[in-house]
Amino acid sequence: MNAKLKELLQRVETWPETDQAEVAELLEQIEIRHRDEYHASVEELAAIDEADRSGVADPKEVEAAFKAFRRA
């Protein structure tokens, strides 16, 4: 582990639990990227739903997006 990261993680241990949870979530997203996985956020899924309802995306595009998220 690089020295800067090790130092930061030691300081993070003194942070409030909510901030530690935020850091953990960010690190998990980076780790998922390294495993070549992706999980759409609630906001992203809502945007796809809105695109479907508004007609911005055709049904095939919406279904393709959902299939990609389901595989993750």
Image (spheres, rainbow, N blue to C red):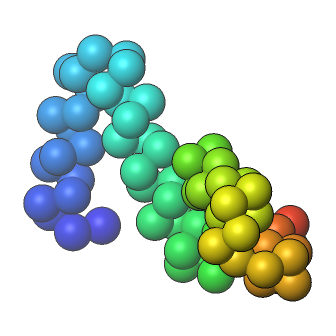
| Residue drawn where x is 44% and y is 42% of the image | 24
Considering only vertical position in the picture, is 63 above or below 70?
below
How many badges with numbers are in the image?
0
Considering only vertical position in the picture, is 11 above or below 67?
above
In this rendering, does residue 58 appear at all? yes
Q: Position of residue 3 (x, y in %)?
A: 14, 63
Left or right of 27? Residue 1 is left
In this rendering, does residue 48 appear at all? no
Q: Position of residue 10 (x, y in %)?
A: 21, 38
| Residue drawn where x is 54% and y is 78% of the image | 34
Left or right of 65? Residue 44 is left
Residue found at the far top of this picture = 16
In which image quadrant can residue 18 be found? top left
Q: Position of residue 28 (x, y in %)?
A: 52, 54
Q: Position of residue 45 (x, y in %)?
A: 68, 54
In which image quadrant can residue 4 be found? bottom left
Considering only vertical position in the picture, is 52 above or below 49?
below
Left or right of 52? Residue 10 is left
- Of 67 and 1, which appears nearest the observer? 67
Q: Quadrant of the C terminus?
A: bottom right
| Residue drawn where x is 16% and y is 34% of the image | 11
Left or right of 63? Residue 11 is left
- Of 61 and 23, which appears nearest the observer? 61
Residue found at the far front of this picture = 55
In which image quadrant can residue 42 be found? top right
Q: Quadrant of the N terminus?
A: bottom left
